Amino acid sequence: MSGPEPAALSNADLQREIQALQARAFERYEDAALQAEAAPDRAEAIYARAERETAPLIDRANTLNAERVARYRRRAARWRRAAIAVAVTGTAAIVWLAVTR
């Protein structure tokens, strides 16, 4: 299962594609459960086939989710650096005001 590179997708597109992949995987597992219920003697083979068929979907969703997590971590690091810069600037301003009075 391949699609556009995760880095090329927007956050909304990442989320949408992950949800679509999850829906397809769940649908496949639900179908397998119904088939296994109808033919209990073949349940193991039915579930194994469902796992094989959904493996590419799950791999793609994991790849997309890894990109999403990496983006959130980069964003958190940027906010952390900005907060530190504001704190240092504020502290310097307070010290300067205290010293000049």
Image: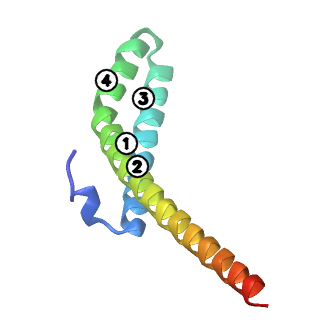
Nearer to us: label 2 or label 4: 2
- Residue designated by label 4: 49
**Residue at 37% from the left image edge and 42% from the top image edge:** 62
Q: Disc 3, disc 4: CB below 8 Å?
A: yes
Q: Is residue 20 above or below residue 81?
A: above
**Residues packed near mark 3 inside 10 Å, few (<14), some (14 to 19) or many (20 plus):** many
Q: Disc 2, disc 4: CB below 8 Å?
A: no
Q: CA distance from mark 3 to mark 4?
A: 8 Å
Residue 42: image x %, image y %? 39, 12
Mark 3 / mark 4, whichever is N-terminal: 3
Mark 2 / mark 3, whichever is N-terminal: 3
Name the element at disc 3: helix
**Residues packed near mark 2 inside 10 Å, few (<14), some (14 to 19) or many (20 plus):** some
Q: Disc 2, disc 1: CB below 8 Å?
A: yes
Please name the amino acid that badge 1 sits on: Asn
**Quarter of the rendering occupied by the N terminus:** top left
Mark 4 / mark 1, whichever is N-terminal: 4
Give the image's coloring scheme: rainbow
Name the element at disc 2: helix
